[in-house]
Image (spheres, grey):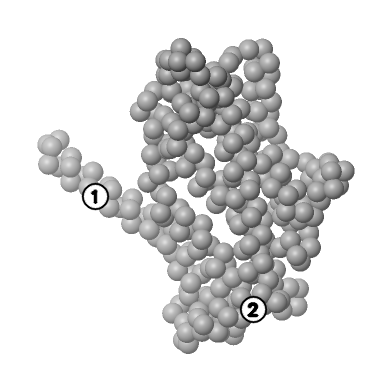
């Protein structure tokens, strides 16, 4: 096989893969967009078709104003939970990952095994609710932040531990010779080098926490604690469903994570490949 024919084959394969990915990922978004623009009667047909009448502004205002502007409250609650949880995940994940990687011991092996167990074992809802009630954190945003941290900490620790393993120990030794203390080594030497993996963790965990549906449903009941995913119940009930407003709500909930992913896509790839290059 000649070099030209090989390049043509690779180009055609790339074009086919790109077209298939576009169909798989763009088609559902277009369906949501078209359904969000339709009237209630037309949306009830569930047809993938161009809207006969565009009702963007009326559907948008109705969704935002539904149940005394519940969507705006949900955005605020979801943002607070996401920012608080991701901040703690970065802080604790980096510190624990650093200790596990740089100071091997019997206790660290036991802690590492516990991290793996936390990553594999599914959470138990009822005991978790009992613990939150005992701490007086049930039905509170603070409790929801701690839940997200507990569920995502194992992944964060493993991610940081793997990345720190690629950083030469010579940097630690040089800082020790200069008189730096352990905390100073972590803050001034190691932490600035963790920027690629930190950006990756921010994007991945913020999208997961912002889009979380089950955990707020279990641990954060109450209208005042509603999150963006729970607002989908506003337009779907046992006796009546407004699918045009439901899909408009889905569109509004989907746009922020989509924007984050589009703008930080290169940073995610850089964070995933930086460790491989250093290793």
Q: Quadrant of the C terminus?
A: top left
- Residue at image location 40% in from the left, 44% down from the top: 267
Give the camera-side residue of 91 and 1.
Answer: 91
Q: Vertical placement of 132 versus 185: above or below?
A: below
Q: Give percent across and percent down for residue 257.
A: 51, 57
Give the camera-side residue of 28 and 156.
Answer: 156
Give the residue number, with chain letter if any, for mark 1.
12
- Residue at image location 45% in from the left, 59% down from the top: 259
Q: Residues within 10 Å of mark 1 (few under 14, many from 20)?
A: few
Give the residue number, with chain letter if any, for mark 2.
65
Q: Quadrant of the N terminus?
A: top left
- Residue at image location 57% in from the left, 67% down from the top: 250
Q: Judge from the rendering whether residue 214 lies leftward or rightward of residue 101; answer left or right.
A: right
Q: Judge from the rendering whether residue 168 lies leftward or rightward of residue 16; answer left or right.
A: right
Q: Quadrant of residue 226?
A: bottom right
Q: Residues within 10 Å of mark 2 (few under 14, many from 20)?
A: few
Residue 41 seen by the camera: yes
């Amino acid at each position: 096989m000649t070099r030209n024919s090989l390049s043509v084959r690779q180009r055609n394969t790339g074009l086919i893969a790109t077209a298939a990915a576009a169909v798989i990922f763009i088609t559902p978004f277009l369906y949501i967009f078209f359904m969000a623009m339709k009237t209630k009667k037309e949306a009830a047909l569930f047809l993938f078709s161009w809207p006969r009448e565009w009702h963007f502004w009326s559907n948008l205002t109705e969704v935002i104003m539904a149940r005394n502007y519940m969507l705006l409250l949900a955005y605020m609650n979801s943002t607070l939970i996401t920012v608080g949880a991701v901040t703690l995940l970065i802080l604790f994940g980096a510190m624990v990952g650093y200790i596990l990687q740089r100071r091997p011991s019997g206790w660290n092996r036991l802690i590492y095994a516990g991290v793996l167990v936390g990553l594999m074992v599914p959470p138990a809802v009822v005991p978790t609710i009992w613990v939150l009630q005992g701490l007086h954190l049930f039905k509170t945003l603070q409790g929801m932040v701690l839940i997200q941290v507990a569920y995502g900490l194992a992944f964060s620790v493993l991610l940081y531990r793997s990345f720190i393993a690629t950083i030469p120990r010579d940097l630690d030794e040089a800082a020790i010779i200069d008189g730096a203390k352990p905390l100073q080594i972590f803050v001034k030497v190691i932490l600035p080098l963790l920027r690629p993996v930190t950006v990756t963790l921010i994007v991945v965990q913020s999208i997961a926490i912002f889009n979380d549906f089950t955990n707020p449903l279990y641990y954060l009941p109450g209208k005042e604690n509603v999150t963006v995913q729970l607002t989908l119940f506003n337009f779907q009930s046992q006796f009546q469903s407004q699918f045009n407003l439901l899909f408009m709500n889905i569109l509004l909930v989907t746009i922020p994570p989509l924007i984050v992913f589009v703008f930080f896509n290169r940073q995610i790839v850089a964070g995933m490949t930086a460790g491989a290059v250093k290793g």
